[in-house]
Structure formats: C-alpha cells, structure tokens
Amino acid sequence: MYNDWFTIGGITIHGYGVMIAIGILMAYFTGEKLGKKHNLDTDQIDTIIFLVLIGGFAFSKLVYCLTVFDQFVKDPLSVLGSGGWVVYGGIVGGLLTGWLYCKKMNLDFMAYFNVLAPCIALAQGFGRIGCFFAGCCYGIETHTVFDVHFPDGSLGPGSAIGALPTQLIMSAGDFLIFGILLKVLANEKTKDTTAALYLVLYSLGRFLIEFVRGDTARGFIGPLSTSQFIAVFTFLLGMYMIWRHQQKNAVL
C-alpha cells in the first residue's frame, strides 16, 4: 500500500519493483533447482527464463496498449512510459517466446514448461504483493473489516474509499497454485500435466477474481474483462492438454 519505500541519491526504491525483482529471482533459483532434479539442461533453463521475461514484458505492455488504445493513439509515450501492464499478455507472450526458442533449438518445450510452470505461479505471487504496494489492481468498494484504504496519490481509489484487497487474494491464490503444482510435478504419474494444470487453475482463479475487481481501466470485451476473455481460452487449452495426456496414457 506504500509504494515509495525510501530514496537514495535521488533514486526512489518502489515496493512494486522490489517485489517484482524478488519474484523473478525466486522463480529463477527455483527453476534451476527443479531443472536439475528433473534432468533438464540448466543452461537452457537460464536462456529460456531470460527470453521469457523479455517476451513476457513486451507482450504485457502490448496488450495494455490495446486496452487503452484511444489514450495510446492520443499520447503514446504516456502509455508506454506508464506502469500499466496486463499479466495475461505477459503469460501468453512468455510462453510464445519460450515455444519459439525451444522449436529453434529442437528442445522439448513441454518438458521445460512443466518444470517451470510452478515458477511462474511463484513469481506471480510476489508480483501481486507488489501490486498491493502500488495500489493497482484493487477490488470493489467494501465496508467490512477486510477493506483497505489506499493512500491518496497511489494507483488505488484513494483514502476515502475502502477497497477489497484483491491483490492479496490473488497473491495467496498464486502461492497456493505454486504448492499444488510442486506436488503434481513431484509425482511421476502426473508430472506431465503440471503445465496444463497451471493454465486451468490460474485461468479459473483469474476469471472469478475479476468479478470483484474495482479498477475499470483494464479494458473489456463485451461483458467480460480482457483478462476474463483470455482466461476462457487458456482454461480450455489447459483442459484439452489434460485430456490429450489422458488419451495418450490410455492408448499406452
């Protein structure tokens, strides 16, 4: 809720950036550890993580620009230089970048995706705490013991309005998904469905939490928010991947 932590030599350290950095580092070290455990090339994991981050951030910003297209057309720099991001754009862009790299290097994309899927959820968990510090992605107005009043000047609705802390709810959900995926990955019978289960669980959680989001600037496609619209397809993709895996095992 307090994003400006302290200033050193004119440089302000922001809580949002710190939590994003922690999430990336935790995901990196966890990915290294899981990669070794599952006999994957850790050098390739390093490269994949690096490229996924680049592709993820680029697509995240691209989708955000599309959600505020009118503002982007009027003043592109104000949008490109803002803190606006769309997490789903980052997920799709990161996965696409990883898939293209694996295809070029003749690597088994799904083997790496299954191992790194828990790491994605882990990074998102820390990232959502960063959202809480910044005040973005806040929930609907509430008048309960659970509401949060974000400081004036933050990305939140202001100190006069009590908002549901959807950022912390999403963070808790991401950490829960991380724990579930670790157990799934550790099981020889289910490890190949880890990535698919990530898509299913995250998509379902994101679709539901959007109903209690209070920030309308994230964009809508018909009655659904942009994230809900994308979640429908990623959920179906995950379910299809699980079905294909079950069909394959049935044949074997």
Image: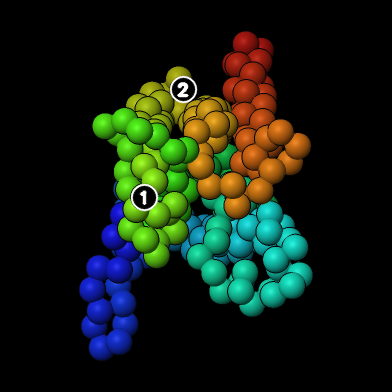
- Determine whether the residue tagged by mark 2 lies in a helix, strand or loop: loop
Query: Which residue is depicted at the point 53% across and 28% down?
Result: 208
Residue count near mark 1 (Cα–Cα under 10 Å), binned few <14, some 14–19, many ≥20:
few
Contact (Cβ within 8 Å) of mark 1 with mark 2: no
Q: Quadrant of the C terminus?
A: top right
Relative vertical location of residue 248 with respect to residue 28 in this rendering, above or below: above
Q: Is residue 19 visible?
A: no
Residue 203: % across, % down: 56, 32
Judge from the rendering whether residue 137 lies leftward or rightward of residue 75; answer left or right. Answer: left
Relative vertical location of residue 35 with respect to residue 130 in this rendering, above or below: above
Residue 147: % across, % down: 33, 38
Which amino acid does the dot numbered 2 rest on?
Answer: Thr
Q: Residue furthest top?
A: 250
Q: Nearer the viewer, residue 2 or 53?
A: 2
Residue 159: % across, % down: 34, 53
Disc 1 designates what residue?
160
Image colouring: rainbow
Judge from the rendering whether residue 216 lies leftward or rightward of residue 34; answer left or right. Answer: right
